[in-house]
Image: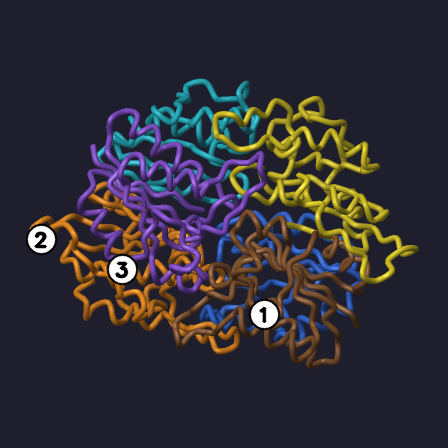
Chain colours: A brown, B purple, C cyan, D blue, E yellow, F orange
Amino acid sequence: MKFGILINEGPYTHQASDTAYLFAKAAIEKGHKIHRVFFYHDGVYNSSRLTEPPQDDRHIVNRWQKLAKDHHIDLVVCVAAALRRGIKEENLQEGFRISGLGQLIESGIQSDRLVTFGD
Amino acid sequence: MKFGILINEGPYTHQASDTAYLFAKAAIEKGHKIHRVFFYHDGVYNSSRLTEPPQDDRHIVNRWQKLAKDHHIDLVVCVAAALRRGIKEENLQEGFRISGLGQLIESGIQSDRLVTFGD
Amino acid sequence: MLHTVNKSPTERNALDSCLKHLTKGAAVLLIEDGVYGALKGTSTTKSVEQALKSHPIYALYPDIEARGMQDRVIDGIKLVDYNGFVDLVAEHASVQAWL
Amino acid sequence: MLHTVNKSPTERNALDSCLKHLTKGAAVLLIEDGVYGALKGTSTTKSVEQALKSHPIYALYPDIEARGMQDRVIDGIKLVDYNGFVDLVAEHASVQAWL
Amino acid sequence: MTEATGGIEMEEDTSGKVKKFLYVNRKAPYGTIYALESLEVVLIAAAFDQDVSLAFLDDGVYQVVKGQHTKGIDVKNFSPTYRALEGYDIEKLYVEKESMEARGLKESDFIVPMKIIGAQEMADLMLSQDVVLSF
Amino acid sequence: MTEATGGIEMEEDTSGKVKKFLYVNRKAPYGTIYALESLEVVLIAAAFDQDVSLAFLDDGVYQVVKGQHTKGIDVKNFSPTYRALEGYDIEKLYVEKESMEARGLKESDFIVPMKIIGAQEMADLMLSQDVVLSF
């Protein structure tokens, strides 16, 4: 089955991104496909390459990057939400791309299920 | 009177930073002194120089910067909270400084009132 | 002591919990989405009116107006602007935010 | 239809509102702080037990365990891991998150 | 809200597919940005020729109340945008009766005509959708 | 939590001043970061020789429950840190009775001994403070 994922909150502050990641990993292991992860609202903060968590903590940004690379997942950061929150190409982690809200709607159309993680 | 201000949430997503700003402005106009504004939790996002809101919207980062410059307010961003959220000298707006949590405690000790704005 | 509440009482428990912790002389200031707690005719009106009998309750007018609630405020709740907010903080020995 | 709830029922109204909108065949999955809604002996237990009579309710075990609540889950609530979460999403035609 | 319209790129051919999209609004405006950014999605959604509905329940009913004046908090008043939705052929706007009544609101308090439905009808509406988005 | 200790710089002379600081915890752990980051502040506060108390009420009582195992959600379990507070001379930890009971918890469920007080005593405790911090 083809899943789309929507993440509405930033890393560490809310559990949303953690849960979405563990959900995505399980889905892939079960043979499903993750069509796209769309980062909206504070979710755009999940894409900052400047993120540096304590050494004994998970690195939320980098593990999304790795999962996406290993399984060809499209990581899309909403441009409008990103601009007002200080996320630009300049501080965007490799593997993420900035695009429009249309990508979210398209994900809703193309995927069999769209699953939302937020606050 | 000497006020300390604590901001726990990021710009635009929550009203906390807006309310804190309008409070600070009013306090100054009434002759009070703002000792320090401490940015904690997602509050650290208020310091990103990459922030670019829509043109018809208020610029939360820059108006803190201006208020601080005009009235000698110490804008302190918590280093631990900032690192795990991708705020570093590299994307820090001028007029803000990154420092430790001790600055918050000190603000509690030194100011007559510590006022918290969060979610 | 001044208590600030910035959460809608129909979404979260902040106002409810705040009202259970009012000591003699304490005041409540409703700000941001907390101003929905200042309204007449809602499911939370009664408990606010009850608290109003023993404690002053204030609401931040700019937040009331932003939400289109200017004609719905409970009689007895005092409306303040940001200057009034500053005065309330200065008048009370400490401030507690119910987040 | 699968409903996910990630909010504590003693802090917010999400679970309460979700339970009022269950149609025939709908299931509820409690995740994150939402798992506090799966507990015995709390002020919200009764309404969850009531819903359980007509709808399956699931709780994400890793979230239960993280919060130290493994011995407190209401009888009849089914525990799932992330694989089970994926299965639930696949089995139901749509998912609605109560944020 | 012109910034939000920047990215309509149809990489895959979505033409022909029409799904039912429901936008569920349960949060009050201004205290948080969810109401505004939800509306930005709805405006984009209009370009995709899908079957779009908006639901307002719980504190979400406060989003569509008349008489919002935001100058005092220095935030943009986005409530007039709900009036513009008709021009985008988004006409299915539902308010939940129970939520409205618990907040002392009545039909005439809304900025645009809304279909008032009970919680049971709201549940049926949610069930009938292909994609439910909540923010 | 070594990162949090980086910035103890006493620019002004705070020695001699002793204020009563109360940390109010009303949120559950893990769903959001507030509980963890509140604890990071408390650990720093210990270095300032102030009169520190911690209050747990509403969902905050869940922070100090025994038996937390976070491996499954891949988040660090910070609850053992509450046991370490004694070593920092932070010994005034209060749990509100009503909050505890509404959640089916009892005194023996907590990871460290807590003073159990009623809502009225909690209110008095709050009143007696110079600085009340809530996150």
Q: Chain of mark 2?
A: F
Nearest the eye: F11 or E49? F11
Pointer 1 residue: A94
Position of E123 with respect to C4 (left or right) is right
The image position of residue F26, as x and y in percent, is: 39, 52
Nearest the eye: C55 or C77? C77
Position of B26 with respect to F29 (left or right) is left
Same-chain status of marks 1 and 2? no
Pointer 3 residue: F42
Q: Chain of mark 1?
A: A
Three-letter amino acid code at the position of disc 3 = Val
The quadrant of the rendering that contains the N terminus of chain A is bottom right
Pointer 2 residue: F15
Q: How dense is the environment of label 1, judged by Cα within 10 Å: few (below 14), some, or many (20 and up)?
A: some
The image position of residue F100, as x and y in percent, is: 38, 57
Does the image show residue E36? yes
Q: Chain of mark 3?
A: F
Position of F125 with respect to E9 (left or right) is left
Q: How dense is the environment of label 2, judged by Cα within 10 Å: few (below 14), some, or many (20 and up)?
A: few
> The residue tagged with tag 1: helix, strand or loop?
loop
Q: Nearer the viewer, mark 1 or mark 3?
A: 1
Residue beneath the point at 25% across and 38% down: B3
Q: Are marks 1 and 3 in contact (CB under 8 Å)?
A: no
Same-chain status of marks 1 and 3? no
Three-letter amino acid code at the position of disc 2 = Ser
Residue extending farthest right: E16
Same-chain status of marks 3 and 2? yes
Q: How dense is the environment of label 3, judged by Cα within 10 Å: few (below 14), some, or many (20 and up)?
A: many
Q: Nearer the viewer, mark 3 or mark 2?
A: 2
The residues tagged by marks 3 and 2 sit, at their Cα atoms, a distance apart of 18 Å
